[in-house]
Amino acid sequence: QEDIPPLRDVLAGDFGIGVAIDARETTGASAQLLTRHFGQITAENAMKPESIQPTEGEFTFEAADALVAFAQQNDLRVYGHTLVWHSQTPEWFFARADGTPLTSSPEDQAILLGRMEAHITAMGERFGDAAWAWDVVNEAIDESQPDGLRRSRWYEVLGPDYLTHAFRFADAAFPDAQLFLNDYNTEFPAKREAMYRVVADLIADGVPIDGVGHQLHVNLTRPVAQVDATLARFAELGVAQAVTELDVSISRSADESLPTTPPERLVEQGYYYRDLFEVLRAHELASVTLWGLHDGRSWLRTWPIERPHEAPLAFDDRLQAKPAYWGIVDPG
Ligand code: XIL
């Protein structure tokens, strides 16, 4: 596969192309494939709160440090993921010393706000200029709520202002980085509009938010026209936009587990990637990140159910280019 065009060259005039990785992608054939095709990395898990601060005040930066060093050695940009999230965040953040849950009392709010600031500040001291962008808050939107905000533990204790605090702490810790609000399903109209209102309000309040991240965990039934509409809508706000976690599931429903990978779905997926990238190229995007280097490393193999034959990415388990790769390369 030395002869096929590097994705980073094919897309050079459009946007940076990134990939989510862990230590497995930093050696051997995977590292070769990565550095040939991609110009940016996201830590798939290594920069999340549970990886960085499993116990209060005890920081474990080693895995993230190794990814940053690999990026620097190979001239790759880093997209930071993520500072404040309801998931993969240790329980201690939201509990008092005696283990009881924090409430929305002023005392408990001060405790959680202090922890948020300490965590973000420590991230800034360690990774201050390592990443050009950060997902400051991940998955904050719930379009079924009147204010559009998910009732996470952050929200329950601190209220809607937790977003403002997170972006202000991040701005102080990462003065030169672009600060993003990142979420999934932003291509659905109701979630799109809920997120739009939240971001517009933050901007109106002078909160230092620079961009919106669209995870884009999609499948073959998701109309690319909805992606087009979402990117056009946020362009009205004048914020930067990135596709942060792209994969295209070949399963048509949440409970479908295929006995094998049907070749015709891989072909259909190739056309899907082609149509999707035609849309992505038509918008101004800071970067587009694939959520995994090859199918064998996709989180969708085990989430939300075991799916050994899921194949959502551009390269297969044997690191060979799939129709999905050619869909990106040959706009047709
Ligand atoms: C996923 C990782 O890929 C898995 O390895 C991990 O077990 C769970 O998290 N939205 C996000 C990502 O913002 O951080 C998630 O990554 C996928 C969904």
Image: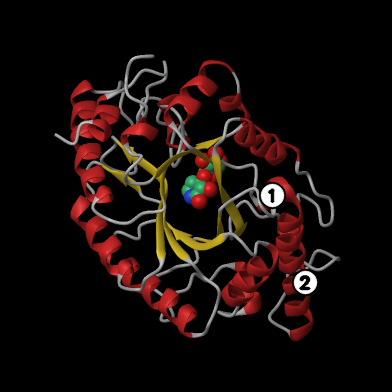
* x then y, percent, for residue 137: 55, 63
Q: In the image, 40: left or right of 105?
A: left
Disc 1 target residue: 50
**Residue in front for this viewpoint, 193 or 171:** 171
Q: Which secondary structure, mark 1?
A: helix
237 relative position to 108: left or right: left
Mark 1 closeness class: few <14, some 14–19, many ≥20 residues within 10 Å: some
Q: Earlier in the sequence, mark 1 or mark 2?
A: 1
- Give the number of marks: 2
In this view, the mark in front (1 or 2): 2
Q: Relative to 214, does residue 28 appear above or below in the rendering?
A: above
Q: Nearer the viewer, residue 130 or 181?
A: 130
5 horizontally vs 300: left or right = left
| Quadrant placement of the C terminus | top left
Q: Which mark is residue 198?
A: none
Residue 155 occupies quadrant: bottom right
Do the CB atoms of the residues marked 1 and 2 lie less than 8 Å apart?
A: no
| Quarter occupied by the N terminus | top left
- Name the residue tied to disc 2: 114
Q: Which three-letter amino acid code belongs to the residue tagged 2? A: Gly
Q: Is residue 16 visible?
A: yes
Marks 1 and 2, how far apart at CA: 17 Å
> The residue tagged with tag 2: helix, strand or loop?
helix
